[in-house]
C-alpha cells in the first residue's frame, strides 16, 4: 500500500497583482487578493483584469488564486456581489473566501468556497457545520492551541475540508468577526473592511476605585504573529494551509516573508522524506533567492506565537504599536546637527536613508531618519563608530543623550536588495533529443508529468569531434534561460554523434517549451466546489445574537434553513443601542498586568485578595469597560454606539436607499 502524501500550502497575501506575482515567484502555493469590492480591506481592491493576469501567472506553477469576498453584505449589495463572484471566476480565480452566509443562498459560480477567519471558528461544532454546508477549507481562529486544532482536525473529513491557519503577521486582538468598536465609535465597520484600529490606541487603565493601573499604554495592541518555530507541530495537529497576513503590506514584506516560510516548509518537507507521514508542496517548482530571508527586517511589533502553546505573558506590544526595530548601538555624543554612535557589531554598516529609533523616558518610540551617514573620524580601530545627520532637527528629539540605546528599523541596503529581482522559481524537466526520419525532435517531460515535443527537419551530418560535439549539444539543450523550467537531466538518443547546429537546438527548445507551457495551461484543473450535505444539517445553536453578523435577509434565510429559531440583526444594523460587548478577546489585561485571580492562587498574602472586577479604558473622551469571563478565560470590551453614528446612518439612509436585515423598524434621523 502506497503512502499518502500530505500537501502543505503556503498562502501569501497580495495588495495588488504585481505583489501577487512576486509572491508566486518567491514560492507561494496560493495567493489571496481582494477583488473589485467586498474584500474586507477597503483600500485593497483590484480589477478583474488584474485578477486574470495574476491567475494566469499562478496557474503556470499549479498555484491557486483566492479572492477575498469576505465582508458582510446588505441586501442591496447581494446582486453586485453575485456578479463579482462570476466575474472573478471567469477571470480564472480558484477560490472565494467568504464570511457572509447569505452568499450560499444565491447563484454563485461553481467555485470552491473557503470560510474566512471572520466566521470565528473556535469549536469542533462550528467547524463541522461549515464543512457540511460546503466549505472546502476553513480559516481557524488565531487564538487556538495545538490541542484545540488537533481536536477540530480529528472531527473533520480531510478529504472534504482542510484547515488553514495564520502563521505570520499583524494580530487582531479580538476574535475575528467579533469586534465592533470601530463601528460603535466611527460608523466604520471592521466586518465591512473599514476598521479604525482602536486597538492600537493608547489607554489609561483605571480600576473600580478610580486608581490608575496603567497610564497611556497600548493595552489592546498585540505583538505580531510568528509561528516559525511551530510549523512541524501545526502540521502534526492537522494544519495544511499556512497563511501569511498582510494584504496592506508592501512588495518587500511579501517577498521576504514568503521566502522565509518557503524555506522553512521545504526543510520540513525534506525532513519527512522516507517517513510514514510524507509531505509535499501544493504547487510546482523550486525557488531560489538572492537574499537570506529575515522577518526582523520588515515592520513588526516584535513577535509572539500567541496561544498556540498556551497562554503567554508577553503577547502584547503595550509600549508602542510602531516598529521598534533591532538593537544596533548606543549614542556616544550629541551635537547640534549630528549624532555620534558606536555600533554593537564591528561589521555593521549604516546607510543614507536608514531609520533609527529609541525609547524616550516615557517609553514612547522616537524615530531618527538618517539623511546622511559617515564613519566617525579619529575613532579607535576596534570601535565601529559613525556620525549620522538626521533628516529632522535634533533639538526636537526627546531625551536623546549619550548612552541612549538605538535600534534600526529600516535598512536601506535591505530595501534596495528587495527592490531588484530577488528570486527564481523553476519547474524541473527531463529533456530528450532524438533523431527522426526528417531530422531531430526534442521531448520534454516536467515534474508533474506534462509532456511536449517539438521537431525540425535537418540534414544529418556526422560530428567532427564527438566528445566536444556532445558536450556542446548538452549545454545548448540545457539553456532554459528566461523560461520557468530547468533541466533535471538531458538525454541524447542518437544512432551516432551528429552535428546539430545551435540555431536548430534553440528553435527546438523554444518550440518544445511553448508546447509544454500550453500543455500545463490546458491541463490545469481548478478545485471543485463541495456539495452541501442534504438534508441541511442543524446549526450548533438555535439562537443567534448580533455576534453572528447577519446583515441581509439571505443570511437570515440560511440560518433559518439550518434550524436557528431566533436570529438577531448584525451590530451594523444598529439595533443594539445600549451597552454590549464591542470586542471579545482571549487577551486579558488583568493577566498581562499580573492582576488575574488565577495568578494569585497559592501566593501567600495575595491569594483571595485579587478579584476579576471590571476595569475601565480611557482614551480622551472615549471610555470602555473591561469585563472578565474567567471560565473560558476571555475579556469583553463593553461600550455603546455613539449617538452621532446612529444619526449618521439615518441621514445616509435618506440620501442613498439601503436595504438590510432588521428585526424592528429603523429609527428616524431626528
Image (cartoon, rainbow, N blue to C red):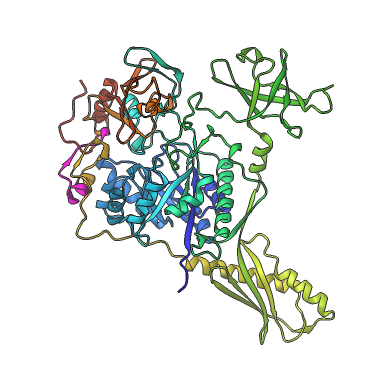
* Quadrant of the rendering where the N terminus is positioned: bottom left
Judged left or right of residue 604, residue 78 is: left
Residue closest to the eye, 562 or 372: 562
* Quadrant of the rendering where the C terminus is positioned: top left
**Is residue 463 highlighted in magenta?**
no
Q: Position of residue 38 (x, y in %)?
A: 36, 42
Q: Position of residue 224 (x, y in %)?
A: 50, 36
Above or below, 396 relative to 281: above
Does residue 114 appear in the picture of this structure?
no
Above or below, 417 relative to 562: above
Q: Residue furthest front?
A: 604
Q: Position of residue 349 (x, y in %)?
A: 74, 32
- Which residue sits at x=42%, y=25%? 594
Residue closest to the eye, 413 or 140: 140
Does residue 538 appear in the picture of this structure?
yes
Judged left or right of residue 9, residue 644 is: left
Judged left or right of residue 436, residue 264 is: left
The image quadrant of residue 460 is bottom right
The image quadrant of residue 194 is top left
Q: Position of residue 556 (x, y in %)?
A: 20, 44
- Which residue sits at x=38%, y=21%? 606
**Range drawn in magenta:** 557-572
- Which residue sits at x=75%, y=72%? 502
Residue closest to the eye, 607 or 420: 607
Residue closest to the eye, 371 or 326: 326
Amino acid at each position: 500500500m502506497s503512502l499518502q502524501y500530505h500537501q502543505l500550502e503556503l498562502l501569501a497575501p497580495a495588495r495588488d497583482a504585481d505583489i501577487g506575482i512576486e509572491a508566486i515567484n518567491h514560492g507561494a502555493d496560493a495567493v489571496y487578493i481582494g477583488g473589485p469590492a467586498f474584500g474586507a480591506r477597503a483600500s485593497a481592491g483590484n480589477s478583474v483584469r488584474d485578477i486574470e493576469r495574476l491567475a494566469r501567472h499562478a496557474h503556470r506553477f499549479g498555484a491557486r488564486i483566492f479572492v477575498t469576498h469576505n465582508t458582510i453584505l446588505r441586501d442591496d449589495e447581494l446582486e453586485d456581489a453575485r456578479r463579482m463572484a462570476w466575474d472573478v471566476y471567469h477571470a480564472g480565480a480558484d477560490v472565494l473566501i467568504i464570511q457572509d452566509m447569505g452568499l450560499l443562498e444565491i447563484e454563485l459560480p461553481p467555485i470552491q468556497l473557503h470560510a474566512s477567519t471572520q466566521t470565528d471558528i473556535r469549536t469542533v461544532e462550528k467547524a463541522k457545520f461549515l464543512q457540511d454546508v460546503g466549505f472546502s477549507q476553513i480559516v481557524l481562529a488565531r487564538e487556538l492551541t495545538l490541542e484545540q486544532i488537533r481536536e477540530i482536525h480529528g472531527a473533520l473529513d480531510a478529504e472534504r475540508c482542510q484547515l488553514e491557519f495564520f502563521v505570520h503577521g499583524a494580530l487582531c486582538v479580538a476574535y475575528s468577526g467579533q469586534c465592533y468598536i470601530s463601528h460603535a465609535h466611527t460608523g466604520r465597520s471592521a466586518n465591512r473592511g473599514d476598521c479604525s484600529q482602536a486597538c492600537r490606541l493608547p489607554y489609561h487603565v483605571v480600576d473600580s476605585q478610580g486608581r490608575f493601573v496603567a497610564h497611556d499604554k497600548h493595552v489592546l495592541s498585540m505583538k505580531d504573529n510568528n509561528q516559525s518555530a511551530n510549523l512541524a507541530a501545526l502540521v502534526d495537529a492537522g494544519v495544511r494551509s499556512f497563511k501569511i497576513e498582510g494584504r496592506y503590506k508592501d512588495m518587500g514584506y511579501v517577498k521576504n516573508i514568503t521566502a522565509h516560510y518557503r524555506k522553512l516548509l521545504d526543510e520540513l518537507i525534506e525532513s519527512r522524506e522516507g517517513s510514514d507521514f510524507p509531505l509535499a508542496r501544493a504547487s510546482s517548482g523550486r525557488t531560489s533567492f538572492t537574499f537570506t530571508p529575515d522577518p526582523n527586517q520588515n515592520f513588526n511589533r516584535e513577535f509572539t506565537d500567541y496561544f498556540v502553546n498556551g497562554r503567554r505573558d508577553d503577547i502584547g506590544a503595550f509600549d508602542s504599536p510602531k516598529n521598534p526595530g533591532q538593537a544596533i548601538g548606543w549614542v556616544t555624543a550629541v551635537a547640534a546637527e549630528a549624532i555620534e554612535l558606536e555600533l554593537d557589531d564591528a561589521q555593521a554598516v549604516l546607510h543614507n536613508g536608514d531609520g533609527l529609533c529609541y525609547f524616550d523616558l516615557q517609553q514612547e518610540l522616537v524615530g531618527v531618519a538618517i539623511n546622511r551617514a559617515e564613519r566617525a573620524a579619529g575613532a579607535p580601530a576596534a570601535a565601529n563608530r559613525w556620525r549620522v545627520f538626521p533628516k529632522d532637527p535634533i533639538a526636537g528629539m526627546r531625551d536623546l543623550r549619550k548612552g541612549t540605546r538605538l535600534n534600526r528599523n529600516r535598512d536601506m541596503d535591505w530595501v534596495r536588495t528587495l527592490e531588484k529581482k530577488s528570486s527564481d522559481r523553476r519547474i524541473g524537466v527531463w529533456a530528450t533529443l532524438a533523431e527522426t526520419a526528417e531530422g531531430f525532435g526534442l521531448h520534454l517531460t516536467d515534474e508533474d508529468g506534462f509532456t511536449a515535443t517539438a521537431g525540425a527537419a535537418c540534414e544529418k551530418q556526422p560530428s567532427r569531434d564527438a566528445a566536444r560535439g556532445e558536450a556542446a549539444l548538452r549545454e545548448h539543450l540545457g539553456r532554459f534561460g528566461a523560461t520557468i523550467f530547468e533541466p533535471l537531466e538531458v538525454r541524447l538518443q542518437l544512432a551516432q554523434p551528429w552535428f546539430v547546429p545551435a540555431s536548430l537546438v534553440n528553435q527546438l527548445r523554444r518550440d518544445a517549451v511553448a508546447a509544454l507551457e500550453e500543455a500545463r495551461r490546458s491541463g490545469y484543473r481548478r478545485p471543485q466546489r463541495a456539495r452541501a450535505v442534504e438534508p441541511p444539517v442543524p446549526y450548533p445553536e438555535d439562537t443567534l445574537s448580533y455576534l453572528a453578523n447577519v446583515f441581509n435577509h439571505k443570511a437570515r434565510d440560511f440560518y433559518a434553513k439550518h434550524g436557528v429559531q431566533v436570529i438577531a440583526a448584525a451590530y451594523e444594523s444598529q439595533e443594539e443601542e445600549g451597552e454590549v460587548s464591542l470586542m471579545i478577546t482571549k487577551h486579558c489585561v488583568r493577566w498581562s498586568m499580573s492582576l488575574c485571580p488565577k495568578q494569585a492562587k497559592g501566593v501567600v498574602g495575595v491569594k483571595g485578595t485579587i478579584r476579576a472586577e471590571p476595569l475601565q479604558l480611557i482614551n480622551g473622551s472615549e471610555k470602555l469597560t473591561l469585563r472578565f469571563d474567567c471560565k473560558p478565560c476571555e475579556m469583553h470590551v463593553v461600550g455603546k454606539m455613539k449617538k452621532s453614528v446612529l444619526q449618521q446612518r439615518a441621514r445616509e439612509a435618506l440620501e442613498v436607499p439601503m436595504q438590510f436585515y432588521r428585526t424592528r423598524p429603523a429609527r428616524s434621523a431626528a
